Image (cartoon, grey):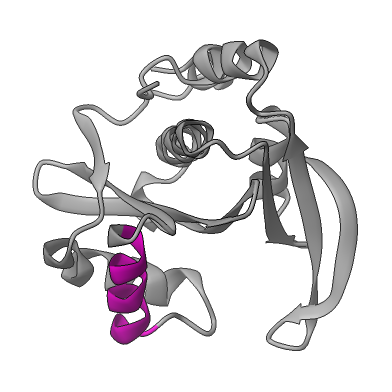
Amino acid sequence: MSVLSRLLGKAGEPDLMVEPLRRRHLAGIMPIEQASYPKPWSLNVFQSEIEMMRRGDRTYLVARVGTQVIGYAGVMYAGDDAHVTNIAVASGHQRRGVATRLLAELAWSAIRHGSTGLTLEVRVSNAGAQALYRDFGFTEAGRRKNYYENVEDAIVMWCRDILEPTYKARLRELCPEAAE
């Protein structure tokens, strides 16, 4: 269990496994995708992202307990930056450290890739996700008007200098279970 989970009094997710997304996981992530987003990605989009992952342009991970997929997350690489494309956790498994683990694993992946910064967009209304991102060192860098479904603004957040030892120490503290 992460330090953050202990501080928040969360029980954690027993036997949580995080591994690279494979085609066999798509049936498990599609219901989560559809429940999480008003305009969900299609199966074809995920298949395309897997192909880009094979070329080294993306990293996608799934979180599972046993054979059940309970979450997923992805990052794309552009120059020196890594852009978090999505993080979603099944409703019955939220607030148990799954998103923390996924984001920590993505951050380590970006570090291994040589990225110097992480960026993402988050809904203005999603205070829980914003708090998670702040714990990881993200700060607001701007806003995108009507970014989501042409009705809700996005906060653009950045986390810089992820190659620095202080950031790596922060990751270890937030989620010691994540793979360096």
Percent of width and height locating residue 48: 33, 77
* Residue at 51% in and 74% down: 37
Q: Foreground: 175 or 46?
A: 46
Percent of width and height locating residue 90: 36, 56
Percent of width and height locating residue 20: 25, 48
Residue 100 falls within the magenta-colored stretch: no
- Quarter of the figure with residue 13: top left
Left or right of residue 93, residue 117 in this image = right
Q: Foreground: 152 or 156?
A: 156
Name the quarter where the N terminus is drawn.
Answer: top left
Name the quarter where the C terminus is drawn.
Answer: top left
Image height check: is 2 above or below 92? above
Image height check: is 7 above or below 21? above
Q: Foreground: 175 or 5?
A: 175
Of all residues, the one furthest to the bottom in this rendering is 150
Image height check: is 40 above or below 79? below
* Residue at 65% in and 46% down: 80
Left or right of residue 121, residue 36 in this image = left
**Which span of residues is magenta-colored?**
42-53
Secondary structure predominantly adopted by residues drawn in magenta: helix
* Residue at 49% in and 34% down: 100
* Residue at 52% in and 85% down: 39
* Number of numbered discs: 0
Percent of width and height locating residue 41: 43, 80
- Quarter of the figure with residue 165: top right
- Quarter of the figure with residue 83: bottom right
